[in-house]
Amino acid sequence: MPALDRRQREFAQREQLFLDKSQELIQRDGLLALQMSKVAEECEYAIGTLYKHFASKEDLLVTLSTRNCLSRVELFERAARWNGPTRDRLVAVALADLMVLREQPEHFRLAQFVWTDVVWGAASPECRTRALEACEPLGTLIDGISADARRRGDLPAGFALPDQALTLGPWVLCLGMHTLAQQAGLIDPAIVGDPYRVMFKHLHYLLNGYGWQPLFDPGDDAAVDAHLAHLSRAVFDAPYPGHPLPPALD
């Protein structure tokens, strides 16, 4: 990659400043309160300069969400490249996602908002393309676990779904539980227990349905907890990030 000249470096540094300030304002004032004029003012630039970087507020939000997504690459790589069974590696990816959610819940809230039609649909095609291209390596890592499982015989021979379709199932399951668990009152832990233990139990039931070896008994709560604790230590050198639920954000 050719070295950037001075003007390109300054442009890139200014863009990071705008994104950093936007993240700060979202954390301070809430997502819906973010205004382009306020970002420019806080960064001490004319609003026209901000619009040279982002054609709209929607483009800024999509770019910020993409940067947050890419901050998870290291954790996802640790899970995907861990020298363990393919099934455990896929569960570890879900653990990585949960760890990010626990540490930075505002990133998930922003992603939820960005994926709505009011933002994603209003963002420029160029911005959406850049976002999809930037996140493609994450999808490739996860799809690679499925491909490796086929090569090792952990998945049944001739399993019909291609890798990208197969990994959609775990992704949708985890995304759905994150959405439910982050909204106050939608899930009662007194009834269902730890929502994320429930999520991992469902994940194992799903993988059992795929025939993904070795099969696991999700009905054994002690075994589920021990498995999550083991993966958290072995892959991430961290405790399992279960309860309590993070506080809701404005």
Image (cartoon, rainbow, N blue to C red):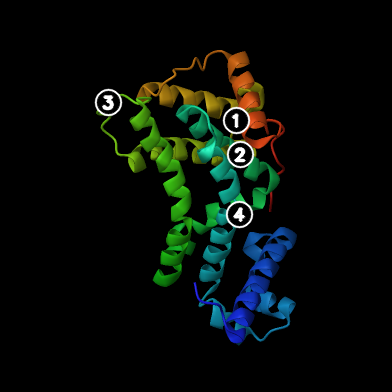
Three-letter amino acid code of the residue under disc 2:
Leu
Residue holding disc 4: 71
**Label 1 near label 4: C-beta < 8 Å?**
no
Q: Amino acid at mark 1?
A: Tyr
Distance between mark 2 and mark 3 Cα atoms: 31 Å
Q: Residues within 10 Å of mark 4 (few under 14, many from 20)?
A: few
* Picture quadrant of residue 113: bottom right
Q: Nearer the viewer, mark 3 or mark 1?
A: 3
Q: x, y percentage for residue 60?
A: 56, 69
Upstream in sequence: badge 4 or badge 3: 4
Q: Residue at x 55, y 83 (%)?
A: 52
Disc 4, SS:
loop
Q: Earlier in the sequence, mark 2 or mark 3?
A: 2
Q: Quick check: 202 above or below 121?
A: above
> On the image, numbered disc 3 is attached to which residue?
157
Is residue 202 toward the left or the right of residue 33 in the image?
A: left
Residue at mark 1: 196
Q: Are marks 2 and 1 in contact (CB under 8 Å)?
A: yes
Question: Callout 1: few (<14), some (14-19), or many (20+) C-alpha neighbours within 10 Å?
Answer: many
Of the numbered discs 3 and 1, the one sitting upstream in the chain is: 3
Mark positioned earlier in the residue sequence (4 or 1): 4
* SS class, disc 2: helix
Image location (x, y in percent) of residue 158: 24, 28
At horizontal 57% and vertical 82% (from top left) the residue drawn is: 8
Pointers 4 and 3 in contact (C-beta within 8 Å)? no
**CB atoms at circles 4 and 2 under 8 Å apart?**
no
What is the CA distance from the residue labelled 4 to the residue labelled 1? 22 Å
Q: Amino acid at mark 3?
A: Ala
Mark 2 lies on residue: 98
In percent of the image, x 51 and y 17: which residue is there? Answer: 218
Q: Position of residue 93 (x, y in %)?
A: 53, 38
Q: Earlier in the sequence, mark 4 or mark 2?
A: 4
